[in-house]
Image: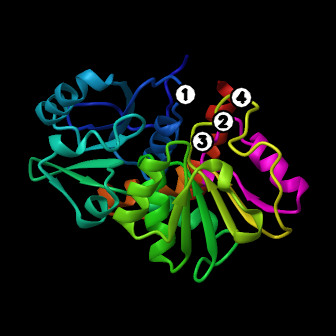
Amino acid sequence: MQPDASAPPIDANTALCGVILHPASHTRSPAMHNAAFRALDLNAVYLAFDVTPGNLEAALQGARAFSIRQLAVSIPHKEAILPFLDAVDATARAIGAVNTVTTVDGALVGSNTDWVGAVRALERETQLAAREAVVLGAGGAARAVVYGLLARGARVRVLNRDVSRAAQLAAELGADSAGPLESFESDRCDILVNTTSVGLRSDASPLPGLRLASGVVVLDAVYDPSRTRLLRDAEKCGARTVEGKWMLIYQAAEQFSGWTGREAPVDVMAAAFEEAGRAD
């Protein structure tokens, strides 16, 4: 492969950024961030680091030693990472999950941009205030989505296979109620967000036989495939759908701006996301 002539040379001044997750083979974050670095002529490079849960603390020690400027944090580390950071901002602390670690004066500071990604993705199709929203899942991504919906004035019900986790999330963040997935009621829903992994690289749905009223907005945080079974079933009901890529793109743009102080080139990042998908 020929080197990209448009990219700044990698040298002793190149800023190192990346994403930690496990497994790492599917991530498109390097494609998005490196495209943004090139577009703004920034001397930085973004890599993917496959970090198992048992190596999380050691990975952060390495990040500190190598002066890594920023790390995105993905599954399964968003909640487990909190005890290993020097500081966590108020929003991430309230959410109870971190998806971004930035080096600030030598300290590793945790924050969360997932909630911004979810809100901006949903706002492509609807306003959120006073809407009835249902969130599927109770992990780190669900916590961020619930936080964002509540911050925008929506009423939120959390459904999860493990009802105790849903109830804990609802209590901690102030959601209206919680229950099992089987309790989903289509007539109590203006917005539906799936944050579970059901449908990832498969044709499964977290809500088989979905029925929705026309006009409901459905966001699936799963981005591979782009048109999940959940989204296809929702479209058949006349729902308006938002692909998971938009949540990922907007949260990445917020990360980029938070570190660089520059407006993220969202169109460039979206194009890089699509190109990375074609290369898979």
Q: Is residue 7 above or below residue 107?
A: above
Q: Quadrant of the N terminus?
A: top right
Amino acid type at circle 2 is: Asp
| CA separation in Å, label 2 and label 4 | 8 Å
Which residue carries the number 4 mark? 202
Amino acid type at circle 4 is: Ser
At which x and y percent is residue 80? Answer: 28, 39
Amino acid type at circle 3 is: Ala
Q: Is residue 76 above or below residue 161?
A: above
Q: Helix, strand, or loop for circle 4?
A: loop
At which x and y percent is residue 140? Answer: 41, 48
Q: Helix, strand, or loop for circle 2?
A: loop
| CA separation in Å, label 3 and label 2 | 15 Å
Amino acid type at circle 1 is: His
Q: Earlier in the sequence, mark 3 or mark 1?
A: 1
Of the residues tagged 3 and 2, which is closer to the observer? Answer: 2
Q: Is residue 113 left or right of residue 261?
A: right
Q: Earlier in the sequence, mark 2 or mark 1?
A: 1
